[in-house]
Amino acid sequence: MSAEKLLEVNNLHVSYGAIKAIKGISLHVNRGEVVTILGANGAGKTTTLRTISGLLKSNEGSIIFDGKDITKTPAHDIVPLGMSHSPEGRRVFGTLSVEENLMMGSFTLKKPDLKTLEWIYEILPRLKEREKQLAGTLSGGEQQMLAIGRAIMSNPKLLILDEPSLGLAPVLVKVIFKAVKDIADRGVTVLLVEQNARAALKLADRGYVLELGKITHEGSSEELLNSKTIQEAYLGKKS
């Protein structure tokens, strides 16, 4: 029995004016998987995620999510279908409290899911400690926790995370990755872009490597971790 594809991207092309950022990539994410996209700065990782979630429009290709063609669907109509995107740079609402930011994440629901809120506080207890604090006064790591928690408040089928560990101290990176694992263990499918390639592959089931807008490698996390090419390009010396 083959795995059920929750997300399928076929022959995707995306341009910024005359610049071709994505050049015909195809990938898929099975229901219940954690899949990571690796690549250097400028490879097209963020563009790929933004196109999948409807923030950018493709020039060619198709995006199928949960059996529905969403290629031309705007972002605000994609979120209610069960996709949530935590963007690079966190983008929390600085003048709102932690709790208010989290509640903003549930705007597509008829009413906030308080059980999900409590679960977020369990896996990210720092947010519970800061629930009445203005988001703009949080540290970078706390803001990243908040961005992930806000994305989870809509109870998504697919959680898209763009560089969740970017700029964080190693101790906070561990907290973030443990939270992502807890989210995946709860049954949420995760598509992750992450420059910390080793940590991402240890968490993920499968991975894709993007170079200059094209997928150059794909495989199980174990295959990519053991690939000499991937080790030299993204992992440094094997530990």
Image (tube, rainbow, N blue to C red):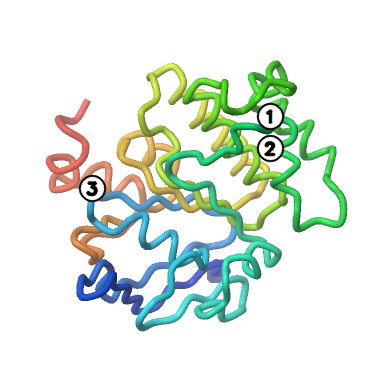
Evaluate if marks 1 and 3 touch, with contact meaning CB atoms under 8 Å apart. no
Query: Tag 2: Cα neighbours inside 10 Å, few (<14), some, or many (≥20)?
Result: many
The residue that mark 3 highlights is: 41
Q: Nearer the viewer, residue 4 or 172?
A: 172
- Could you tell me the amino acid type at mark 1? Val
Give the Cα distance between marks 2 and 1.
5 Å
- Decide which of tag 1 and tag 3 comes sooner along the chain: 3
- Could you tell me the amino acid type at mark 2? Asn
For residue 26, above or below residue 92: below
For residue 12, above or below residue 201: below
Q: Position of residue 23 (x, y in %)?
A: 25, 73
Q: Position of residue 177 (x, y in %)?
A: 49, 32
- Could you tell me the amino acid type at mark 3? Asn
Q: How many marks?
A: 3
Evaluate if marks 3 and 2 touch, with contact meaning CB atoms under 8 Å apart. no
The residue that mark 1 highlights is: 98
Residue at horizontal 56 percent and vertical 21 percent from the top: 138
Give the Cα distance between marks 3 and 2.
29 Å
Residue at horizontal 65 percent and vertical 41 percent from the top: 150
User: In front of the other: label 3 or label 2?
Assistant: 2
Give the left or right position of residue 128, taking residue 124 as reference.
right
User: In front of the other: label 1 or label 3?
Assistant: 1
Q: Quadrant of residue 231?
A: top left
Residue at horizontal 38 percent and vertical 19 percent from the top: 170
Circle on res. 101? 2
SS for tag 1? helix
SS for tag 3? loop
Give the left or right position of residue 43, taking residue 94 as reference.
left
For residue 183, above or below residue 68: above
SS for tag 2? helix
Query: Tag 1: Cα neighbours inside 10 Å, few (<14), some, or many (≥20)?
Result: many
